[in-house]
Image (cartoon, rainbow, N blue to C red):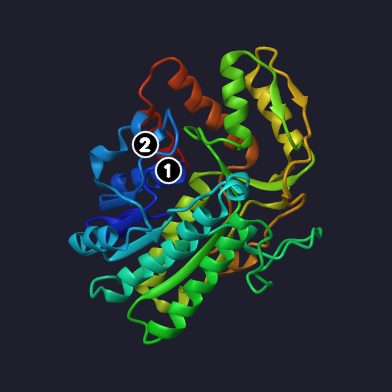
């Protein structure tokens, strides 16, 4: 991964205050990009964005992706060359609680950022980050490919399917002349230091571990493709750079781990407790809950064939790195420095 492409590039990033957005912001800052972020206030307390002082290396605009006028103003001021769209309501269970907000954010938010791109004369590359849950999940044993049917079940997953369709429509309707390269990236579940979200298994593990309490696992039987956050973030940067230089790379890409890293949730928690130590245990509190996929994985052959890409950190390493970051935070250390250390290690620098 050579990030020298981004030195001096003007980059606009929605969702920069979130977990994945914070890691991506640091990677772009370290690469020398001129980054403008547009997002709501950090979604958790504590928040990685605040703990790592991510705003110090960028122009941070706090705003709602649904607020088209404010988004346009921030976008026009930035005059970006590269645009990454990460802003979303990202939690499945929260989408059952407030489906209207989920659709407004995930669908109309996509429309709003694409309107910015459509009106711009500076943008050369646009990447919309969605999810592995965009597919009609048939609960089969093989991975979904990019040409499979899009029909997410729950409001979150379905809204992201809609976001994919919106992107495809705008691409056909307004960008067929190739003046802007447009792609979508469908990533699996991510883990890493600084994720404090609710209803995510590794943040639940961290919270329980730091309290010295057993981890409560609500669905230990679901199988998911887990990967360290730096895996998809580095892929997003790779795709956006490649398609800016050659439009043939524009398309839809699955971004997930190898089959070996598709773990049952209970097995992932076993791995976490083993590496955390201190006699940490977990309890099965399977509650049924609203519908969520039991088995889901991606076929990433297109990404591997197109770019020669392979994952760098398997799940064993990803859990170790998550715990390393957490230990630094737990001891009052500089988590910004720890992020940078892990980024450099991941990039082989």
Residue highlighted by disc 2 = 49
Asked whether residue 50 appears in the rendered view, the answer is yes
- The disc at residue 305 is none
Q: At x 70% / y 47%, what residue is drawn?
A: 224
- Towards the viewer: 2 or 281: 281
- Towards the viewer: 165 or 185: 165
Quadrant (top left/top right/bottom left/bottom right) for the N terminus: bottom left
Residue highlighted by disc 1 = 18
Count of number-bearing discs: 2
Asked whether residue 132 appears in the rendered view, the answer is no
Residue sticking out furthest to the left:
77
Q: At x 63% / y 70%, what residue is drawn?
A: 146
List x then y, in percent, for residue 139. Answer: 80, 58
Q: Residues within 10 Å of mark 1 (few under 14, many from 20)?
A: many
In the image, taking residue 341 as reference, residue 31 lies left or right, namely left
In the image, taking residue 215 as reference, residue 287 lies left or right, namely right
């Amino acid at each position: 991964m050579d990030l020298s492409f981004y030195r001096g590039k003007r980059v606009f990033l929605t969702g920069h205050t979130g977990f994945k957005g914070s890691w991506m912001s640091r990677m772009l800052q370290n690469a020398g990009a001129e980054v403008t972020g547009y997002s709501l206030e950090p979604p958790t307390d504590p928040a990685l964005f605040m703990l790592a002082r991510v705003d110090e290396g960028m122009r941070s605009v706090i705003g709602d992706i649904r607020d088209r006028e404010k988004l346009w103003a921030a976008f026009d001021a930035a005059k970006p060359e590269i645009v990454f769209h990460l802003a979303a309501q990202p939690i499945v269970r929260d989408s059952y609680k407030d489906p209207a907000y989920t659709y407004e954010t995930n669908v109309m938010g996509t429309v709003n950022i694409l309107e910015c791109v459509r009106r711009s004369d500076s943008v050369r590359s646009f990447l919309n980050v969605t999810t592995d849950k965009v597919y009609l999940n048939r609960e089969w044993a093989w991975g979904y490919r990019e040409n499979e049917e899009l029909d997410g079940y729950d409001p979150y997953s379905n809204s992201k399917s809609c976001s994919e369709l919106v992107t495809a429509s705008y691409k056909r309707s307004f960008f067929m002349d190739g003046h802007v390269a447009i792609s979508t990236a469908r990533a699996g579940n991510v883990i890493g230091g600084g994720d404090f979200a609710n209803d995510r298994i590794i943040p639940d593990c961290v919270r329980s571990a730091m309290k010295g309490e057993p981890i409560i696992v609500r669905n230990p039987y679901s199988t998911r493709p887990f990967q360290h956050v730096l895996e998809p973030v580095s892929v997003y940067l790779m795709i956006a750079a490649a398609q800016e230089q050659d439009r043939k790379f524009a398309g839809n890409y699955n971004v997930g781990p190898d089959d070996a890293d598709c773990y049952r949730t209970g097995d992932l928690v076993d791995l976490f407790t083993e590496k955390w130590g201190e006699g940490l245990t977990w309890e099965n509190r399977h509650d049924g809950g609203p519908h969520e996929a039991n088995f889901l994985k991606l076929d990433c052959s297109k990404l591997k064939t197109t770019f020669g890409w392979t994952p760098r950190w398997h799940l064993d390493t990803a859990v170790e790195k998550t715990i390393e970051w957490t230990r630094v935070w737990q001891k009052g250390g500089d988590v910004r420095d720890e992020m940078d250390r892990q980024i450099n290690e991941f990039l082989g620098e």
